[in-house]
Amino acid sequence: MALQAQELKPRGNFLKDSVKVGEVVPFTFSYKDRKNRPVIFPDSLYDFAPFELVSKDYYDTESDSINSIDSAVYYLTTFEIDLVQKLSLPVFLVNAGDSIPLFSDPDSIKLQEVVLQMPDSVDLVETTHYIPVSTQFNYPYFIIALFALGFIGLIVLIVWGKAIRKKIKLYRLKKKMEKFRLGFEKEIEQLGSQPGKTEIESVLKFWKTFMEGLDKIPYRRLTTKEIVLIHENKSLEETLKSIDRSIYSQMAVSALQNDFEFLMDYSADRYNHITEEIKNA
């Protein structure tokens, strides 16, 4: 209270003498204070009753060597029917981490009446014509729905996230296996009865490419000996060596149908093994 008594009051004035219901009227507000002392003006969260805030304009602080002047214009409207309406606004003086309100003297404005006398009865005109009304998007409900969906999604991930990831991984693996099976069979069919060394190498490369994605091992950069050392499978060793002889030896290409069928079966076994590992993880 002592601080308020020592301060000059802010000044607030309507720029019009009268206003109609719903009409916008400007209200100027200014405060002269010591230079560089922080003050806070009312914003959109402040209660301007009996008026409602439509918009506001803040202006840059003007200062001399001693004082500063802050000013703003508030554009207000009223829907009250009192013939005289008053308004007093505060500035908030920031002092030691607290803010103290200092109010301006009230300024009044007259309500300009449009209907001076109500008739005893009113003749209403009936109309059945459709008048289109523009719809508005309900942003508050939309934001609430987003938060709700996000919260539900988070709960689902926490409770069932691991199981969902497993199912997705198994589904993708199954699709890859089906695609490989069809592609591998097509590659074998294209070999014909007298396959060339280039065609055989292409089929082997197709198998190695699929196995790389399945086992996460760089098969295409490994030799037959290195692949066998990883898997330690005698049948796989014999099959790969048989295919290598058909590719690199000077001898005529022998029948490779059984070798390629073994590679298909071996891929299926690896696929089944990996799917079981995923299910039991």
Image (cartoon, rainbow, N blue to C red):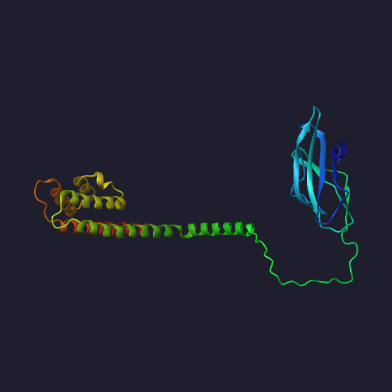
- Relative depth, front residue between 138 and 262: 138
Vertical relation: 66 (above or below) 266: above
**Quadrant into which the C terminus falls:** bottom left
Q: Total number of numbered labels? A: 0
Vertical relation: 63 (above or below) 132: above
Residue 242 in percent (x, y) is at 14, 51
Residue 54 in percent (x, y) is at 76, 51
Residue lying at 17% horizontally and 56% vertically, measured from the top left: 259
Residue 140 in percent (x, y) is at 64, 57
Question: Would residue 140 be visible to someone looking at this image?
Answer: yes
Vertical relation: 103 (above or below) 188: above
Residue 85 in percent (x, y) is at 87, 53
Question: Would residue 37 be visible to someone looking at this image?
Answer: no
Q: Residue 260 appears in which quarter of the rendering?
A: bottom left
Describe residue 66's horizontal placement relative to residue 139 as left or right: right
Describe residue 116's horizontal placement relative to residue 131 as left or right: right
Q: Residue 226 appears in which quarter of the rendering?
A: top left
**Quadrant into which the N terminus falls:** top right
Describe residue 269's horizontal placement relative to residue 278 as left or right: left
Q: Residue furthest top?
A: 65
Q: Residue 143 appears in which quarter of the rendering?
A: bottom right
- Relative depth, front residue between 16 and 8: 16
Residue lying at 60% horizontally and 58% vertically, measured from the top left: 142
